[in-house]
Amino acid sequence: PSLSGRVPITVLTGFLGSGKTTLLNHILCATHGRKIAIIENEYGEVAIDDALLKKAENERVASGDEEIIEVLNGCVCCSVRSDLIAILHKLAARAAAGTLVLDAVVLETTGMANPTPVAQTFLLDETIRGAFRLDGIVTLVDAKHIEMHLDDVKPEGIVNEAAAQVGFADRLLLN
């Protein structure tokens, strides 16, 4: 945990194919000695990222490090935000009870997620605000395709997710 006693949460976002899962695999497989909870968000019936993360999870469990991987079916920026709140409440309760030690949390959003409502989750809920702090929003950018995504014309009232992800990020990682 940070000096404030609150666990830092990094929101990892980026359009489809930008390299979010590759970065998560690197974090999970690296020997850094930190206890990191991963909240992995996959939209759809089959959790594609879950298969990619499984090998890293097995390696970490075999080495004695505890990793938590939660797979959400849906978009944490909209209807499943209540699931995100429930997961964070569960992690906070376990940490408060002393059954879980966390150095950080990484929340991977789907490639279609607008990060604004996700960030609001950490500000609006008192329990979450007391246990966690938003460390930052890291947006992975596929340098080859970003211009196409940013130029994508959406119907009126529909957010260009790529533009929102880049605009709301406090760190950009070019891939």
Image (tube, grey):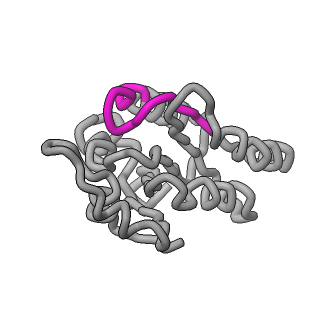
The residue lying toward the viewer, choosing from 136 and 35, is 136
State the residue at coordinates (49%, 72%). 144
Quarter of the figure with the C terminus: bottom right
Outermost residue, right direction?
Answer: 62
Residue stretch rendered in magenta on the structure: 69-83
Image position of 72 with respect to 38: above or below: above
Magenta run includes residue 171: no
Residue 69 locus on image (x, y percent): 62, 38
Q: Position of residue 151 (x, y in %)?
A: 28, 63
Magenta span contains residue 80: yes
Classify residue 58 by image quadrant. Answer: top right
Where on the picture, by quarter, is residue 129?
top left
Q: Is residue 113 left or right of residue 22?
A: left
Task: Tell me if 130 is positioned left or right of 158 in this view.
Answer: right
Q: How many marks?
A: 0
Q: Is residue 98 above or below residue 18?
A: above
Depth order, front residue of 22/90? 22
Q: Residue furthest left?
A: 156
In this rendered view, identify the residue nearer to me: 152 or 160: 152
- Give the vertical position of 8 relative to 43 (above or below): below
Which residue is at 50% across, 34% downward? Answer: 43
Q: Quadrant of residue 156?
A: top left
Q: Residue at position x 46%, y 55% from top?
A: 12
The percent coordinates of residue 44 (x first, y second) are 52, 30
Going by the image, does 133 lie left or right of 141? left
Residue 72 % position (x, y):
51, 31
What's the residue at 60%, 44% (across, down)? 101
